[in-house]
Image (cartoon, rainbow, N blue to C red):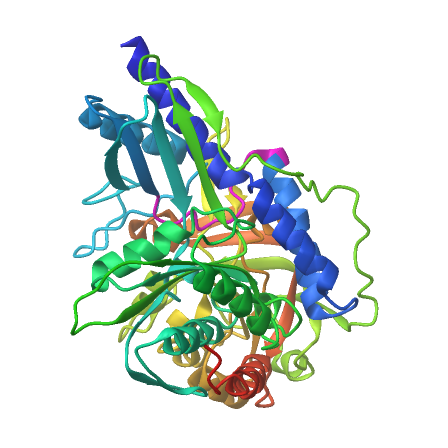
Amino acid sequence: MAYLETLEKSLYSLVTETSTNLPKDVRRAIKAAKEAENAGTRAAMSLDTITTNIVMAEDNVSPICQDTGLPTFKVYTPVGVNQIEIKKAIQTAIAAATGDAKLRPNSVDSLTGKNSGTNIGAGLPVIKFEQWENDYITVKLILKGGGCENKNIQYSLPTELEGLGRAGRDLDGIRKCILHSVWQAQGQGCSAGFIGVGIGGDRSSGYDLAKEQLFRHVDDVNPIEDLAKLEKYIVEKSNTFGVGTMGFGGEATLLGCKIGVMDRLPASFFVSVAYNCWAYRRMAIDIDPATGEITNWHYQDGEKITFRDEVKQDNSDNKVVELIAPITEEKIRSLKVGDVVKISGRMYTGRDAIHHHLIGEGVEAPVDLDGQIIYHCGPVMAKDESGNWVVKAAGPTTSIREEPYQGDIMKKFGIRAVMGKGGMGPKTLKALNEHGGVYLNAIGGAAQYYADCIKSVDGVDLMEFGIPEAMWHLSVEGFTAVVTMDSHGNSLHADVEKSSLDKLALHAERVF
C-alpha cells in the first residue's frame, strides 16, 4: 500500500511539473528566439507575453496553457514490474491533478459529446508500456494541446506539394515534406514551434515515431549524419519563411526539429510530422520500483533561463485602442489590422460546442450578444473556498475550427468582435466586412497572463457542454490582443500565408 501511495504522489508530481514548468532546454530555445527577434514588432511583443506567462505559471503552479492536451505516457519497466498497478496509479494521479486544476478536463465521449470531467475515458489517458533490462522505471509524459495536434500532418510519397512541387521517395522528398509541414502550420499551432518527424512505418507507427521524437532534447544531435544535417537545415530554412511568433510575421518560426526513421513496406512511404507549440510540455522521471519514489528528473542539463527581471519591449509606437462592450459598429470600423486593443468590461467565452449550438434553427443565445465580444477559449476553472468559480488558466484556442459558423453567428446575434488565435478564413473575413466586425488575435498559450486580466466570473451558461465548452461570463481589465482581421477586408493571416508561401517556394530546388 505504501508503495502505491508513493507511486501515485510521484506521478502527480510529474503531471504538475509538466503542466506548469517548462524544461530547461525549451526555455533556452525560447530565449534564443527572443534575442533574434526585431525590437518593437508584434512578434517581439508576443515573445514578451510568452516569457511573462512562463514566469507566472511557475510561480502560480498553474497550467502554462489552458489546453493541457491529451496526456500521453511512455513507461519503461523492468521485467516483472506490475504494469496494471502503474496504469491505475497514472489514472489516479491524472484524476487528482484534474481536480486540482493542474489539468483541464479534456476527455470527451466521441459519440455523446459528454465530458468525463476527470481526463479519464475510453483510451484516455494514453499509456504505452515497454519492458527493458534496467532496474528502474522511467515514465515520460507529454501534454500536447489540440491546436498543435490539429496541425500534425502525414505525407505519402510521391506527392505534389504546394509551393515545392513534386516530392519523391528520397531524402530530398522528405526534406520538402518537412518544410511544407512547418509552412502549413502558420500561426494556428502557436508558433514558434517544434516538430518531431517519423520517416517510414505505416500510418499509425509513423505518427508514433514522430511523437516519440518530441521526447528528445532540443539541443541533441541525431546519430545518423544525414538526419543530423537535415534537422539543422529544416530549422535554418523554416526561419526564413517569415511566419513568426503567433503567425504575426518575424524571425522565429521553428525552434527545433527531430527526425526518426524506421523500415517500411515497399508499397508505402510515409513522412509523419508531429507539430508542437512553443509551450513544449514534456517531462520524464525515473522511479524506484521498490518504493515508488522519484530518483531522477530528466531534462535538467544546462542553464535554466528564468525570464525574470527582463527588460520588456517598448511597444509605444503601436496604436492602442480601449474597447468596452457593447461596442458600436462605428468603433469597430475605425480599427485597422495591426492595432493593439485593450479590453475592459464583459466578454463571453464560446468554443466549438457553443458555435454548433447557436447556429441551430430557432436557437436563442442565453445572453444578449449584441455589440459583444466572443472569446474562443476553454478555460481551466476551479472553485474557491466560498464556492465561487475562479479562472486558473485562460489563453485562446485555435479559431479556424469555427470558420463554418462564425460569420453567420456574428450577423445573427450582432457580435462585433471575436477573439482567438491563428486567424480565420475568407467566409469570416467577408462577414466582418459586411456586418462590421473584427478578429482579435490573443497570444496562444499565454494562459496565466490572460487569467490575471480576468477579475471575476459573473456567470456561466450551457454547462451541459462541460467546463471547456461552456459560455463563461468574464469581467476583464487590460486584456490585450491584436487586430489581425478588420472590417475593411484586410487579413494579416492571409498576407503572411501568401508571403511565406513565396519564401517556401525558394526551397523547391533539389538539395539532398
Displayed quadrant of residue 177: bottom left
In the rendered image, the quadrant that contains the C terminus is bottom left
Tell me the chief SS of the magenta region.
loop
In the rendered image, the quadrant that contains the N terminus is top left
Image-based side of 153 in relation to 19, left or right: left
**Observer able to see residue 494:** yes
**Residues shaded magenta:** 59-71
**62 in magenta:** yes
In the image, residue 97 above or below residue 371: above
Image-based side of 485 in relation to 379, left or right: right
In-front residue for pair 180/376: 180
Query: Residue 466 location, x and y as percent?
Result: 33, 49
**Observer able to see residue 388:** no
Query: Residue 45 location, x and y as percent?
Result: 71, 62
Query: Residue 201 location, x and y as percent?
Result: 23, 61
Please tell me which residue is depicted at 79% across the width and 68% down the height of the picture. Answer: 40
In-front residue for pair 19/376: 19
In the image, residue 470 above or below residue 93: below
Query: Residue 393 location, x and y as percent?
Result: 52, 46
Please tell me which residue is depicted at 20% across the width and 56% down the height of the picture. Answer: 110
**470 in magenta:** no
In the image, residue 336 above or below residue 69: below
Image-based side of 427 in relation to 255, left or right: left
Please tell me which residue is depicted at 60% across the width and 76% down the height of the picture. Answer: 484
Please tell me which residue is depicted at 46% across the width and 44% down the height of the picture. Answer: 380
